[in-house]
Amino acid sequence: MLEVSRVSPVEDRGVLRSAARRPSPPAATAGTALPVVYGLDIETDTTVDGLDPRVARIVAVAVAGPTEVKVFDDADEPRLLDRLDGYIAAAEPGVITTWNGAAFDLPFLADRARRHCVPLGLELWLDPGLRVRAGALPGHLGAYRATWHRHVHLDAYRVFRADVVPALGVSGGLKAIARVCGLTPIEVRTEALHELSAEQIRAYVASDARCTRELIRRRWPSAQAAVDQVPLLADGASAGWQQPRGPEHAEAIPQDGSVRRARARRIRPAPPP
């Protein structure tokens, strides 16, 4: 049984940060053996537009691993982001799996970190080939491939959207897929997340992270092909790209769908607007 725990400010003092520029994918990802899989989920402030990183802060993040679920829910958002990054940096290299994280969770985290000038080991690059059905996150043009310190990324939503959703005619939401697969996710009215207690929010975000992890674990042999592939620069370093900001830069997306040719810039903390 997984332990769900809230990470205290004292617990992660002195966490070592990885200096690696590009993660080495876990050896198990080359075959059908199961690598270390982490589920990651975020919850945002619904007292404002919780889908807009320009106005909504992150209120909780959960990382579900093999033996525990860690929940970060500091009221101080910069501290939350810094401790989350330290935890991921120190974790055994593996696959971070999200549910629609390519279009929501990861760019949301990157935007909030940039706003507070908090450096993250998260690298993103725009992939025009990834379809965004509900529209891009405000301030963005689409979805991303990603790495985070020594971890690779896999968007579980895209795996299940490609086959289970059309085959069974179910919603592409995490809860619907989890129920079909025999899991029992916690369900709340997400638009009213702010009405929940801190304990209820911790339980909810932990449930989503745990379900995301378990869904990929159950179908790893077929899902592993969806792990994000990291393009390389000439010097062998990863091309950790952040898309140009705003629709006025739409011409930066190459018409042939090439990720490598997209004109973009590396993620750098910048003063908030």
Image: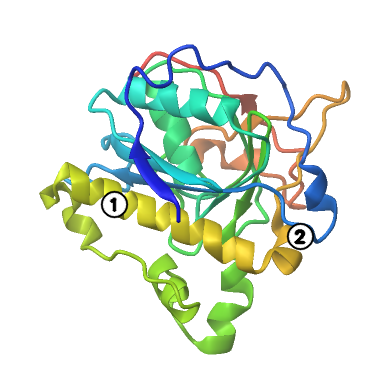
Q: Residue most toward the front?
A: 1
Q: Is residue 109 above or below residue 85?
A: below
Amino acid type of disc 1? Answer: Ala
Q: Which mark, residue 225? A: 2
Q: Is residue 138 above or below residue 18?
A: below
Q: Nearer the viewer, mark 2 or mark 1?
A: 1
Report which quarter residue 9 is drawn in.
Answer: top left
At 50% across and 59% down in the image, what residue appears?
Answer: 212
> Residue 161, image x and y in percent?
57, 71
In the drawing, does residue 42 fall left or right of residue 122? left
> Residue 199, image x and y in percent?
20, 46
Q: Nearer the viewer, residue 127 or 35?
A: 35
* Residue at the disc numbered 1: 203
Can residue 50 be seen in this snapshot?
Answer: no
Label 1 SS: helix
Q: Of label 2 and label 1, which has the lower sequence position?
A: 1
